[in-house]
């Protein structure tokens, strides 16, 4: 990001106060396992277990239960 989008990087870090996860670039099979904790605050396996228990096919159904 720094190399290809220097102005975007500067705006994101300086103006918006964003944090760049240096060296974080997982693609392929590990993507969902790596992003689930960051986006949902739970491990992918925890959500899959809950999905099986609720007999649902959508992660949103599991996450929405926690908000109510």
Image (cartoon, rainbow, N blue to C red):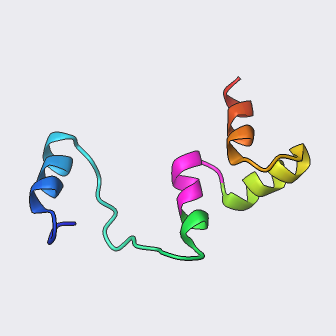
Which residue ends up furthest to the front in the rendered image? Answer: 57
> In the image, is residue 48 above or below residue 14?
below
Is residue 41 highlighted in magenta? yes
14 lies left or right of 36: left
Point 66% across, 57% down: residue: 43
> In the image, is residue 21 above or below residue 39?
below
Question: Looking at the picture, how far across and down is residue 12, in whole percent?
Answer: 20, 48
Q: Count of labels shown?
A: 0
User: Which quarter shows the N terminus?
Assistant: bottom left
SS majority, magenta: helix
> In the image, is residue 24 above or below residue 54?
below
23 lies left or right of 56: left
Which residue ends up furthest to the top in the rendered image? Answer: 68
Point 53% across, 59% down: residue: 35
Which image quarter: residue 61?
top right
Point 68% across, 39% down: residue: 63
Question: Looking at the picture, how far across and down is residue 22, in whole percent?
Answer: 31, 68
Is residue 45 highlighted in magenta? no
Which image quarter: residue 60?
top right
| Range drawn in magenta | 35-42
Question: Looking at the picture, how far across and down is residue 6, in whole percent?
Answer: 11, 62
32 lies left or right of 14: right
Question: Looking at the picture, how far across and down is residue 24, in whole percent?
Answer: 39, 70
> In the image, is residue 28 above or below residue 17?
below
Which residue ends up furthest to the left in the rendered image? Answer: 7
Point 59% across, 64% down: residue: 32
Nearer the observer, 50 or 61: 61
User: Which quarter shows the C terminus?
Assistant: top right
């Amino acid at each position: 990001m720094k190399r290809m989008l220097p102005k975007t990087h500067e705006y994101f870090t300086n103006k918006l106060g964003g944090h760049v996860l240096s060296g974080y670039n997982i693609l392929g099979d590990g993507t969902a396992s790596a992003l689930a904790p960051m986006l949902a605050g739970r491990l992918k396996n925890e959500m899959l277990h809950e999905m099986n228990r609720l007999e649902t096919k959508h992660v949103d159904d599991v996450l929405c239960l926690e908000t109510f």
